[in-house]
Amino acid sequence: MNFRFNGKTNPHCDYMDYQTFYGIDRDVQYNEVLGRPGGVLSHIKESVRTIEVNLLIDAYGTGRTLEDIVDEVVSWLTTNEPVPLIFDREPDKIYYAMTTGGLDPSYFVTFAKVKANFVCLDPYKYAVNGNQNTAISDAVSVVNAGTADTPVIVEARALQNSNYYMISKGDEDYFMIGDDDLDKPLKDYSPLILEDEARSFVGWSKQTTIDFTDNQTGGAVGGSFTQSSSKQSFYLNADSVNGNGWNGAMYKRSFSKQAQDFTTTVKFGINQKNKGAVRFAQYIYDSDNRVIASIGYTNPNAKQAIGTIIVTLFDQSGNQQTIYKYKNNPSLYKLDSFVVYIRLTRKDNVFTVKSWKYKEFPYPLRKQSFDEHERQFVDGGNFYQRPVASLSLYSAKNGNNNVMPLYIFGTYTRELLPRPTNARDMIIKKGDLITIDMATKNVLVNEESYLSEKTFGSNYFNVDKGHTELVINPPGIFDTTVKWQDRYL
């Protein structure tokens, strides 16, 4: 019989049998009380699940050596984290497992019997197919057909601005981000002055000249962008530029108003599977149309995937100062693709740069925000305090070298208004997507970690087996979907 591990099967490897305990292995801890029969329950600890699998690895008829096939199987079964494991004997159940130690073989001429030991850090089994339900009138029904309570994933799209989001189970269990204290003043202290998600070139003006020098992430201009077939991103038309060195395309757009304190975030995707050189930058301009900041990314080597995020500031004379330089974590080098977020915030004379990466795996796997990094720079001489009024997007290739695909997904700039002490802010904006993962205890808003906004006293919760009703507040503000997998002992 065959089995699927990490989403794959191997035609040369089948399992003969496997053994694991029924239910959950529990360590029941208790205290003995003098004068009282028996004991008093103190704690129940659920142990990891172990699975012992007898495998048959067969090289017959392959034209390859048994050792070569075994190496292939070992590589397949070796992971750095638990991954889905599905046996033909239980085709509708998933274990999340990883191997421990080596494989214990008994060799024959063209095949080997091997004993593999798996460990499940999460001892439960889950249904292969996930479930989801959408809230109606701010209430959503969850039916867990398993034999154990199970965590859920909550996805809520904001239909209006809001100062908080809460989902509750009964009278006691609830999870909330934000502040619902009605005694505090409420206002939007960070209004949008530009939001564009690369759905259209309307409002953007193509640039044919450039009047500043950016030696970090810039280059010549004159090329053009193309919109993706999905109409969800811009990318460089590589055929529109030529010549040696860095050449690319730049498009510019004005804010709805000038701003002194501001925060701007740019979002783009990298396809590292196609090796190549690439540069990208978002430039911020002052009210006199002079560049004041650049938020950029560069992968200068056409044969490697080692990207670096670079943020710089420009004084009135055009002199450039680097305030942030962060090379991708080496764990990203082998990823085929991921999304990059870079945020630059100016509040008084303090600049804060935050970057993070994001990847979404097919359900029931998780959305992940990772490789977060943050740094501050104090403008002690007030060299970079001009009001901001517009921005441009730039992407470039290098000569005749292959270009690494880079897709611009969106840019978002907000004015930061003075906020009184203890005032409530509209921390959730219309269109924001909130994701709450009760299993991993992660909260994302627009793919950024939002754990800092978790309300004190609220907590993550599971839904019981059978039917559970969840309620969303504030009413009429969010379009909510709940996803879950039935869970079994």
Image (spheres, helix red, strand yellow):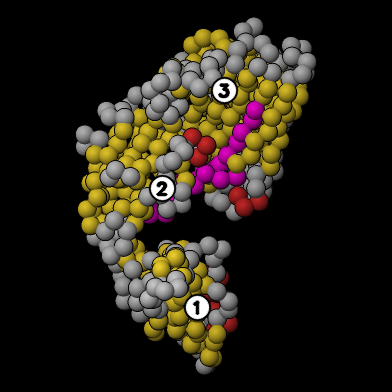
> Circle 2 — which element?
loop
Distance from disc 1 to disc 2, alpha carbons, whole Å, reads: 32 Å
**Which residues fall within the magenta stretch?**
352-371
Select label 3 or label 2 by which is in front: 2
Residue at 44% over, 84% down = 54
**Residue situated in front as seen by the camera: 380 or 396:** 380
How packed mark 3 is, by other alpha carbons closer than 10 Å (few <14, some 14-19, many 20 or more), is: many
Residue linked to disc 3: 263
Q: Is 227 included in the stretch rendered in magenta?
A: no
- Provide residue 463's location: percent of width, then percent of height: 31, 53
Q: Tag on residue 291? A: none
Residue linked to disc 1: 117
Magenta: main secondary structure equals: strand
Instruction: Kindly indicate the quadrant of the structure image that contains residue 379.
Output: top right
Q: Tag on residue 460? A: 2
Select label 1 or label 2 by which is in front: 2
Mark before the other along the chain sequence, 1 or 2: 1
- Provide residue 268's location: percent of width, then percent of height: 53, 35
Residue at 28% over, 52% down = 131
**Residue situated in front as seen by the camera: 319 or 65:** 319
Amino acid type at circle 1 is: Asn
Residue 197 vertical placement versus 133 (above, below): above
Residue at 41% over, 74% down = 35
Amino acid type at circle 3 is: Thr
